[in-house]
Image (cartoon, grey):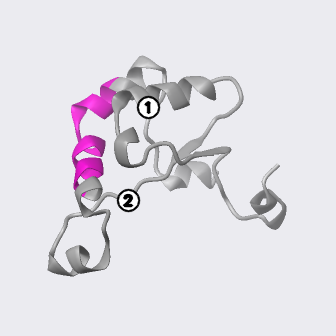
Amino acid sequence: MHEADYTGIPTTDRFSDQFYADGITADVVKQVVKAHEHDTETLEFMCHPAFIDETMLSLTSYSDYRIKELTFLTSDEVQEALKSVGAEVVSFKEVMK
């Protein structure tokens, strides 16, 4: 049980930090979901998608990956990958139920 569960803070059942840098792929998404298909209802992927401007470029070295994440997360490819393993994107409202 998560510490957040004890404090009443809504949280997902599982968290993955594998969707990062070179891990921004449909295969990684499917592998992580499949690894937890029997032990979780909700799974959060750490991600940092963003539109990049001059300020963002000056603040982070992760800019190229942020663009890659945004492009992937808004693509049909990610929806197809999730559907192929029986998963779907939900809003945080679903986690709070």
The residue nearer to you, when weighing 22 against 88, is 22
Secondary structure category for the residue under label 1: helix
Rendered position, 53 above or below 31: below
* Tag of residue 43: none
Image: magenta residue range? 67-80
Residue 92 among those drawn in magenta: no
Q: Residue at x 22, y 38 (%)?
A: 75
Q: Main secondary structure of the magenta part?
A: helix
Q: Amino acid under label 2? A: His
The residue nearer to you, when weighing 6 against 72, is 72
Sequence-earlier tag: 1 or 2: 1
Q: Residue furthest left?
A: 54
Q: Position of residue 65 (x, y in %)?
A: 28, 54
Does residue 71 appear to the left or right of 96 in the view shown? Answer: left
Q: Amino acid under label 1? A: Val
Does residue 15 appear to the left or right of 26 in the view shown? Answer: right
Q: How many marks?
A: 2
Tell me if label 1 and label 2 are in contact, CB under 8 Å.
no
Q: Residue at x 51, y 54 (%)?
A: 92
Residue under label 1, please give it: 28
Does residue 13 appear to the left or right of 72 in the view shown? Answer: right
Q: How crowded is mark 2: few (under 14 residues within 10 Å), some or many (20 or more)?
A: some
Q: Which residue is drawn at 40% across and 23% down?
A: 83
- Quarter of the image holding residue 24? top left
